[in-house]
Image (tube, helix red, strand yellow):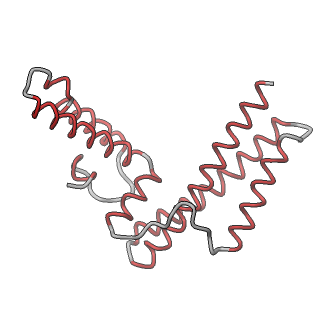
Amino acid sequence: MNYFEIFGLEQTFIIDLNALTQRYQSIQKSVHPDKFAHASSQEQLLAAKKSTLVNDAYQTLKNPLKRAQYMLEIRGVDMPNEQASFSDNAFLMRQMELREMLADVKFADDVDTALFEANQVLDTEFQQLFNTMQAAINENSVESNQQATELLRKLKFYQKLQVELDRLEDQLLDD
């Protein structure tokens, strides 16, 4: 049983997060290990395993990038190693430019404006890639799934940059 089936959801990228959360809470109540406190140790172990599976499924499906990766894995698409380099030279150059942009924020005359602008750039570029990835996943062909895989890797890079920017903001505004 895959994660979508656990929650009775259609296997599509766009899901109703409210319905997912409601189903998660309902299922979790029925399999939660506390409910089996007076049951046999085998039943307790089974309940703990089910609860873990339901938690993992929920955490995966509620996060769009994890959901995309899961859907691609279900489709049998090989996911490249996170450390594998990109063959897209334009993206490699963009990575360097974005890292320089983050480094320059520290030395900006107006740190608030520099942080805001960096956030805007990352959000805009992330959203463009995300929309393209979503379309590729929805198409579900061999070529589109490969394209979605590459886009997912790029989106994870943007996600890491956003975390770095958030840390930088905390650091700069705490001083």
25 sits to left or right of 153: left
Vertical comparison of 40 with 141: above or below: above
Residue, x 8% and y 25% (percent of image)? Answer: 39
Measured as percent of width and height from the top left, residue 27 is found at 21, 36
Vertical comparison of 167 with 147: above or below: above
Residue, x 43% and y 52% (percent of image)? Answer: 66
163 sits to left or right of 103: left
**Residue at the extreme front of the image, as rendered:** 41
Vertical comparison of 102 with 150: above or below: above
Measured as percent of width and height from the top left, residue 46 is found at 15, 38
**Residue at the extreme bottom of the image, as rendered:** 143
Residue, x 34% and y 70% (percent of image)? Answer: 76
| Quarter of the N terminus within the rendering | bottom left
Residue, x 27% and y 32% (percent of image)? Answer: 25
103 sits to left or right of 73: right
How many numbered marks does the figure carry? 0
Vertical comparison of 113 with 136: above or below: above
137 sits to left or right of 51: right
Measured as percent of width and height from the top left, residue 52 is found at 27, 39
User: In the depicted view, which residue is nearer to us: 40 or 149?
Assistant: 40
Residue 125 in which image quadrant: bottom right
